[in-house]
Amino acid sequence: MYFSLLPDVQYDTKPIKYPFSESDYTIAKNFFRRYTINQDVFGYATFYNQYTIQDGVKIEEIARLYYGNVLYDWVVILTNNFINPSFSLPLDSYTLNKFIEEKYGDEMYNIHHYETIEIKSSQQIDGIPITVLDGGNIVDNNFHTSTFTYWDGTEYINVNPGSASKAVTNYDYETGENEKKRELYILKRGFLTRFVDEFKSNNLYSDSGSFISKRLKQTRI
């Protein structure tokens, strides 16, 4: 279905040289036109469901589950801005372990980086403890081996070195990156027709020097 919605381009199949003469043309799909979703729209829960993909689940299966037709797999791909679906989905445990072993070898458990651990103060606002250190921020070894100090409203609190951050190994890092791929945004079925119509509209050519029709243009010499 996806390819049938892409416009065509007519291009010259013969080498062009002076003096120019009439050339033969061939027609192909214009794969250079790419439709992307603005990342800001993912903040609108009205339009999307969040879906956690499990090992072995294919995009076609998700399309069948949500839209009743595997041919809408391209909607799942576009709404998640996948460049290459083969590398955008999470690897299963066996494939992931093989990938990490081949990439890092004997260094798979070496430290990749350090990242902070969330720390909350005893001080509260409206009954909610104040966060004095966000978790998940990448820091250097100097931070990791130093004392972290913060003010909790009444006194300074010292956090021992290594307690405000943790070491992340190469294995942990790759596993974490793989897990991030499990969370997908699935366009709700009620907006499917509108999305497809908008996609069609955005893939029509406007009148120009290379314009032949709304679905076909010619490459310029």
Image (spheres, grey):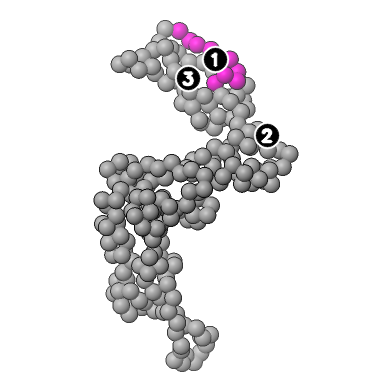
Residue for point 47% across, 19% down: 119
Inter-mark Cα distance, 1 to 3: 10 Å
Q: Which residues are magenta?
A: 155-164
Query: Which of the two residues, 127 or 75, is positioned nearer the viewer here?
Result: 75
- Label 3: few (<14), some or many (≥20) within 10 Å? some
Q: Is the Cβ of the residue at disc 1 closer than 8 Å to that at disc 3?
A: yes
Inter-mark Cα distance, 3 to 2: 26 Å
Does the magenta stretch mainly form a helix, a strand or a loop? loop
Give the amino acid at mark 3: Ile
Residue 131 lies in quadrant: top left
Residue 124 lies in quadrant: top left
Q: Is residue 213 visible?
A: yes
* Mark number, residue 159: 1
Query: Which of the two residues, 140 or 37, is positioned nearer the viewer here?
Result: 37
* Mark number, residue 109: 2
Where is 46 relative to 118, above or below? Answer: below
Closer to the N terminus: mark 1 or mark 3?
3
Residue for point 36% across, 58% down: 69
Give the amino acid at mark 1: Val
Give the amino acid at mark 2: Tyr
